[in-house]
Amino acid sequence: MRAARKPTAMERLRRPARMEFLHELLEFIDAGAKRLGFDESARGRIRLASEEALVNVILHAYAGADGEVEAGLSGGEDRSLRIEIRDRGAAFDPLAEAEPDLEAGLADRKIGGVGIFFIREAADRAAYRREGEENILTLYFIRT
Amino acid sequence: MDIVMTTESDVAVFSIIGHLDAVSSPELEGRLGTWFEEPGTRLVLDLNGLEYISSAGLRVILSAAKKMKARNGKLGLSRLQPRVREVFQVSGFSSIIPVFETLPAALDAVR
């Protein structure tokens, strides 16, 4: 009988919230997903949700001032991957934003909100919480 | 990401290869911006080599589509790979920008 896999301790990577660090943060997340056995198609979804969450912090969390963003990841007993994206900007719940109008024609179509829509769509579950001075966005992915 | 621009008689073709994300999309935006300085009206984005696209990449393509419409031009996308196709479908972009299975089909459609 195989022992149930225990959740792994959370690994973290903290970097300045700037676009030049986006790829390093995404590679860190992708390496973790690969280690946990997620296939290429699932890793595409994980990368998409993670990029949209990180870019949102990089572009908006600190309103032009310096700040940091942290990616944390851990594997769960239930074949899951949990990713936490943390920043110390003003309180902001991306999941509370209105959905974009995906039916609009070309003339009226706006890109605003599509990134956050992709976070919801690509992750199996997403949750936001404010803890002290931190925004914490948690993304869950289940390995099929 | 790599961008290869070719001209098929009177149609400009941008082949976009690799990842079109928040880091690389400004480069595509710049290359298309240069093309938009000329009065071309037939444009194809060939996505055969594109493995990944995020909302930052979609933003650049949406902006190109709007500019083409403003100048009464025609834009077509060709050869979307499964994961890129999924992003276009989920975002509703496949219903506002014409998508073709093959490059010749896209070239025919914008002529």
Image (cartoon, grey):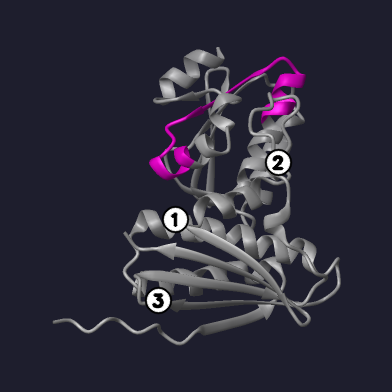
Residue A43 position (above or below residue A85) = above
Residue designated by label 1: A44
- Residue type at mark 3: give it: Gly
Work out whether residue A100 can be spotted. yes
Q: Which residues are magenta?
A: B65-86
Work out whether residue B31 can be spotted. no
- Residue at horizontal 70%, vertical 46%? A113
Name the foreground residue: B67 vs A11: A11
Tell me whether circle 3 and circle 2 mark residues in contact (CB < 8 Å): no
Which sits earlier in the primary sequence, circle 2 or circle 1? Answer: 1
Q: Position of residue A51 (x, y in %)?
A: 59, 60
- Residue at horizontal 48%, vertical 14%? B108
Residue designated by label 2: A111
State the CA–CA distance, disc 1 to disc 3: 20 Å
Asked if residue A132 lies left or right of residue A8, the reply is: right
- Residue at horizontal 49%, vertical 72%? A82
